[in-house]
Amino acid sequence: MRLLSIDILRTAAIGMMVLVHFVENLSSQYSQSAAGPASREHLWWLPVGMAAPLFTLLAGVSYHSWLALQRDRGLDDCTISKRTVRRGLFLIGIGFAFNVFVWLPEDTFNWDILTFIGSALIFLNLIRKMPTEVLIFGIILVAVVSPALQGISDYYAYWINGYFEYDWTLSDVVLGYLVTGYFPIFPWIILPAIGFVIAPILFPSATTPSQGKRPSRLLLVTCLSIGCIAASLSLQQLTFLSPLIYQRTMFPASSSYLLGAIGVSTFSLFTLHRIVDQKPDEKNYSPSFRILAKWFRVVSKHSLSIYLIHHMIHLWPLWFYGLMTAGEPTAHWQNFMPVVFSTILALFFCALVVPAFLIIDKYRLPTIESVMRWIGD
């Protein structure tokens, strides 16, 4: 059973990604030479910090729900593991293809979010039978050692120009996967792991807890959310620590940033679950909200396709135009049009994507999600 709270938040995450990527790739340095080095300050309104953490945390939540569904269907652990690994490897393969054909071959090993989520699925399959206490200890351990690993690996040396650059050597490729890439295992694995841990707490139907424990479980999630947000704000004041801890940055993912993202994501999921998932019948919703709920489910169901398509639809024309006008595909990257135009394009894309996938679903046309299910299941 799909939960509307998850669909709403995944839709929000995808919407934020679309807006951020259109604006950053088309406009983030537009007329920078005239505006000066601080020109990027006009992008303060972009929701750059929440989309990826929310999306990856929901991946852990969804995997727990998927596991429960497989068990309800009577599948044995070996079959579940095989399906999980196939899905993970499929996402990793799609991630590499995406890097080569949507970005450019030199970005093959930039370790973007698709390769990370594929790796996270395989990792979650390995730890899914561990006691919750062990998982929590592991999450804390990763959080503690990640700043040290970022410092030892000289993280900033790979981000001199504001994006990940590496040499085609085994050490750089492996280090990018583990620590220095866009979404390395350390520390990003924390988010899907936390999603996996809190899923049975928020959604006890996925397990079989006693109803008497439910209030205390919900209180635990509330305390976790508020505690993470408070800890994030506190760390930002401790400027005598390493910047990898107190600075609120996504690249690198600092301790302060991760705590804040975890707190906001879990609180949002908890709140929406209490508001929209408690009604057993959607007929209790208003007609307008039922339409919105249908749209949320469409976007959530096809989030992988939307992620791929929204990159293709604005990057391929940009590469082609750069190749035709300057002989270099990236000649106009981040400097193609004013911010207002790229924002309008992003909103226009969002407006078209729902009816497009409604038609796709109506005629049962193949999508990347259906291909993944065919291969994985």
Image (cartoon, rainbow, N blue to C red):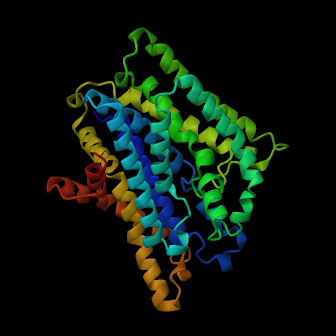
Residue closest to the far top = 212
Is residue 338 visible in the rendered image? The answer is: no
Identify the residue at the far left of this view: 363
Depicted 86 relative to depicted 329: above or below: above
Residue 239 or residue 121, whichever sits in front: 121
Location of residue 4 with respect to 173 vertically, above or below: above
At which x and y percent is residue 346?
42, 63
Q: Residue at x 46, y 32 (%)?
A: 128
Tell me if residue 11 comes above or below residue 61 in the rendering: below
Residue 199 to residue 252: above or below = above
The residue nearer to you, when weighing 351 against 377, is 377
Left or right placement of residue 305 versus residue 23 in this view: left
| Residue 336 placement (x, y as % from top left) | 51, 78
- Name the one closer to the observer, 79 or 40: 79
Q: In which quarter of the image is residue 3?
A: top left
Where is residue 274? Give x, y as percent.
Answer: 40, 26
Query: What quarter of the picture does the C terminus occupy?
Result: top left
Q: In this view, does 108 lie to the left or right of 347?
A: right
Q: Which residue is drawn at 69% across and 44% down?
A: 146
- In the picture provided, is 37 more to the left or to the right than 52? right
Give percent across and percent down for residue 262: 57, 37
In this view of the protein, can residue 204 be seen by the observer?
yes
Q: In which quarter of the image is residue 312?
A: bottom left
**Residue at the image position 51 percent from the left and 72 percent from the top:** 26
Question: Quick one: which residue is furthest to the front in this view?
Answer: 78
Between 116 and 79, the one lying in front of the other is 79
User: Which image quarter: residue 273?
Assistant: top left
